[in-house]
Structure formats: structure tokens, C-alpha cells
Image: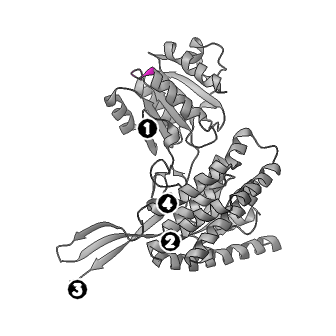
Amino acid sequence: MTALADEVARLLDTAARAARDAARVLATAPRPQRDEALMQAAAALRARADVVLAANAEDLAAAPDLSAAFRDRLALTPARVEAMACAVEEVAALPDPVGRVLAEWTRPNGLVIRRVAQPLGVIGMIYESRPNVGADAASLCLKAGSAVILRGGKESLRSAAAIHGCMVAGLRAAGLPEAAVQVAPTADRAFVAAMLRAAGLIDLIIPRGGKGLVQRVQEEARVPVLAHAEGLCHTYIHAAADPAMARSILANAKMRRTGVCGATETLLIDAAIAPGLLPLLVADLRALGCDFRAEDRARAILPDLPAATEADFATEWLDSILSVKVVDGVDAALDHIARFGSEHTEAIITQDDAVAADFLARLSSAVGIHNASTQFCDGGEFGFGAEIGIATGRLHARGPVGPEQLCTFRYQVMGTGQTRP
């Protein structure tokens, strides 16, 4: 091991051991104390908004060559700082996820068995350069009684440090250990590798970012991973869709914020209505600055659309580009989603409730939506206050991950003197 790698491993060990000590305190801290830390952190975000925005401006100035979508994810505004503070307050107002009795039953021998929610312990959060993720992750982990080590992207280091200072101010004001929320003490990529190898010190790794980041974490981790895969989301406009509704929803699903994982990347439209509706949809989106990649049947209706390759339908654009395909009904739409989707979020637009129920029942994605924008796949919109990511795996949690999903459970067995024969 080189001297640098050895030093990084030492830094991780120190941070993780401090986090474990803090996690033991959080696990038994009463809800009012944890909520007070969150409320004080929200107050600090507002009081220090100028400091946070100045740090963010330095981050943006230091990286002038970022794409428009990346800059949108990185950039903070007064409204976005206020939204962060509101999200922290909303998390504080949620019911306590710790100590919930998830199930209770009595055995024939009189033993009473309870399944009770408990904190995970220490969570490692690895994310790319979207500063609000740090505040969201910290608040959700605190609410769920777990400590967190945050490692954001190198482009957002100053923003992350300023936001972290606000979270620490909340912990200090509530009398909780400051090590409950930590940021990586170094920007060296070796720190990520050390986090992934920290079995026994870190209980769960959550990656949030692009496909490359998630794949690296899944391949290298020796710690359990709650994966947030890419958001290759689809909106399917069925033959029984209300045209005005379809136009409104698609414009929002694609163009509200193109760089978020819930943005629609592919439009699937039924052949029965495509000749009349597709030109209107394209005109709406073009007016908003969208470009397209279309297969042959769509180009037969609108020949000026750029041709799509198979790879285009497998691309999470995170930009003002929409893949377009004409399909023959629900079966064809579901087949396309199964082949190219990432099991994140899909929407169906239709006035036929039976068709919508069939589509949602057969969909394997974490979130299915009827007659609304895919951009509603967000923890705040689900009532979780915030989210730490959108889980697309099959174990532990799926969809937006809020405080309840950041808990595990234990069993409590109550007897009256029983012995086992």
C-alpha cells in the first residue's frame, strides 16, 4: 500500500469509528432531540444561505466546461436553498420510523413476538455533484437514527462543506454528536474505494449518480449496496388518452428538469392516435427547446425527425432530447420498456382505467404512474420529506428511499417462563 493510500485508509477508519460511536447515541436518542437537530439545521441553512450560495458560485466558476444539464444539477439558487431547508423541516415533521412495531403475533405456547424497526447504523452516501443530496441524505439518516458519511462529487466540494456546516450546527444545538454527519475529509478517489471496503464499519452504501458510478460501487463494494440505477423513464400515451392531458403531462415529464432521474427519456405512443397527436407533441416540446431521436414509424409521420438508433433507446439523456417510438398497444409498450428500461419509473396516459390497471400490474419498474408526470417520482412528492435516492433493485427497498426505508428491524420475544421441549 502506498503512503497516500495508507493515509486515506486511516482517514476512513477514523471517520467510520466516530460515526459508529455517534450511531449508538442516535439509536437511543428520543425523537424530539433528533427532530430538534433537523429544525436547527434548517434554520442554519436559511441563516447561512449567503455562505452556501457563495460556495456554490465558487464551485460553478471552477468548472466552466460542464454541460448545461450538469450545471443545472450543481447550481444552487436562493429558491433551491430554501427548498433544502423546507425539505429538512418536512423530514422532521414525519412520524418517527425508529421503534415502530411492524408486526406482532402470539405463538401457541404463549410467546409474543414483535418485529420492531431499528436504525441501520452507519450509512455511506456516495453521490455526484448535486449539493442538495447532502442535506437530504443527512436529514433522512438522522431521522432514521443512523450516522452518515457523505462523499459528493469533486465539482461540489465547497457547496457540500457549506451545507455540512449547517447540518453540524443543528446537531450541536440539539446536543447530538457532530460525527453523526460527516463529509469525506479528502477529495481523493481512494476514499471512495476505502468506503467500499469498510465492511464492519459501514453498514450500507448508497450510490446516487450516473451509471458508471453505480456500476463501480456494485462491482467493488464489500459492504451491502442499496443501488440507485439510471433513470431511463418512459411515458406511454395509450389510444384512449385525453390529448390535452397527454400534451401537458409529456411537456412536464420531459422538460421540467431534464437532468433529474425522473425525467422521461422515451415517448411511446399508440399507432392509432400517433398521426394526429404526435405532431402536436413534437411541436410543444420543440417550442421548449427539445430535440428528438425517432424510429421509422414516427419518422413516417414527421420525416424531419432525426433517426434513432437502438442505442438511443437505451440512453438516459439527462438533456433536452427525447427518444420516440410508435407502438401497437399495451403489450408492445411493455415489451419495449422491459427491453430498454432501467426499472425506475414509467407512466401511462389513458382514460381507460382497466388498461391503466393492466399496465401497472404487469410493469416491473419500481414506480408506475397513471395520468401524471414521471417527475413525481421524488421523495418529497411521495410525502417522505426528501429522498436519498430511487432504489431500483429488488431487495430491501424500491422507489424513493425515505426514513422508513433507511431502517432495518429486529425481533423482540416476550415470554412468561416458557422453556423449549
Residue 39 screen position, x and y as percent:
54, 66
Which residue is found at the position 26% from the left and 80% from the top? 414
Q: Nearer the viewer, mark 1 or mark 4?
A: 4
Q: CA distance from mark 1 to mark 2?
A: 34 Å
Q: Check disc 2 and report the residue beneath it.
A: 34
Which mark identifies residue 91? 4
Q: Which residues are magenta?
A: 239-243
Measured Cα–Cα span from mark 2 to mark 4: 11 Å
- Image quadrant containing the N terminus: bottom right
Whether the magenta-drawn stretch holds residue 26 is answered as: no
Q: Amino acid at mark 2?
A: Arg
Label 3 neighbour load within 10 Å: few <14, some 14-19, many 20+: few
Please state which amino acid type lies under the numbered disc 1. Ile
Disc nearer the start of the sequence (3/2): 2
Query: Label 1 belongs to which residue?
Result: 369
Q: Is residue 283 left or right of residue 411?
A: right
At label 4, counting other C-alpha atoms closer than 10 Å, the crowd grade (few under 14, some 14-19, many 20 or more) is many
Dot 1 falls on a residue whose secondary structure is strand
3 vs 4, front mark: 4
Q: Residue furthest front?
A: 47
Label 2's element? helix
Please tell me which residue is depicted at 50% across the width and 17% down the height of the picture. Answer: 277
What secondary structure is marked by label 3?
loop
Residue 419 is marked as: 3
Camera sees residue 206: no
Q: Residue at x 39, y 21 (%)?
A: 240
- Where disc 4 sits, the SS reads helix
Work out how far the residue at label 3 is from the one at label 4, CA to CA, in angstroms: 44 Å
